[in-house]
Image: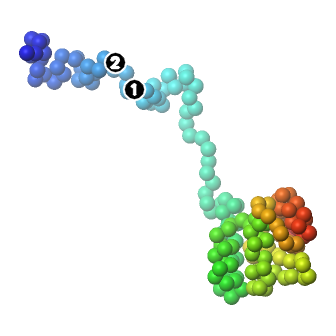
Amino acid sequence: MPKPKIKKIRGSRTCGSGSHKNNSRGRGCRGGSGNAGMFKHKYIKAIKEGYDIGKYGFNRPKAVRSDLKAIKAVKETLRELKNEGKLDDYTYRYLYSRPELNVGELSYIIDRLVELGLASKEGDVYSVNLDELGYSKLLGTGVVDKAIKVTVFKATPKAVEKIEAAGGSVETL
């Protein structure tokens, strides 16, 4: 059988726990638990505890970012070469999926580029102009097992080191 006090308050809105906001949780009117309201009704507490208030950081629009412009230029150049018939489907897909070219990838595809007429071979040395393919920078990841003479706008020091170790050279524009 319930206690007499409980019986007496059944049917009331709050069942004896005061204001309807408190709901007898035993914490009073604190305005939320944890960090709720930290930049609203608990603003002074946030300042005292040293929280950074406001937004920070900035993302440049895609239309302005230079790296995305370069990727777009590479893809456009490759598309034009394919439409002119200078690139076959395999080479087009291979290069299109790589917005930046590494020395290992160049070493892998150089024979295909010679077949298509986009590179040349004189003896054991391959010559390729990456600017004609739309690439402005050569990166240094991968293994170079062929002597390649590369003409490119920019090349990383690691890329230059690997190509020269294989007997090739890098000419920057």
The amino acid type, in three-letter code, at marker 1 is Ser
**Quarter of the image where one finds residue 173:** bottom right
Vertically, is 157 above or below 19?
below
Along the viewing direction, whichever of 106 and 154 lies nearer the viewer:
106
Q: Which mark is residue 27?
A: 2
Coordinates of residue 37 in the picture (x, y in percent): 43, 30
Along the viewing direction, whichever of 117 and 107 lies nearer the viewer:
107
On screen, residue 153 versus residue 72, left or right, reads right
Q: Earlier in the sequence, mark 1 or mark 2?
A: 2
Residues at discs 1 and 2 in contact (Cβ within 8 Å): yes
Find disc 1 in the rendering and name its residue.
33
Characterize the local packing of mark 2: few (<14), some (14-19) or many (20 or more) Cα atoms within 10 angstroms: few
Quadrant where the image shows the N terminus: top left
Q: Secondary structure at mark 2?
A: loop
Q: Secondary structure at mark 1?
A: loop
**Quarter of the image where one finds residue 97:** bottom right
The amino acid type, in three-letter code, at marker 2 is Arg
Residue under the image location 56 percent in, 40 percent down:
55
On screen, residue 80 versus residue 129, left or right, reads left
Q: Could you tell me how far apart the alpha carbons at marks 1 and 2 are, in whole angstroms?
A: 9 Å
On screen, residue 103 versus residue 124, left or right, reads left
Q: Is residue 2 visible?
A: yes
Residue under the image location 22 percent in, 17 percent down:
17
Along the viewing direction, whichever of 135 and 52 lies nearer the viewer:
135
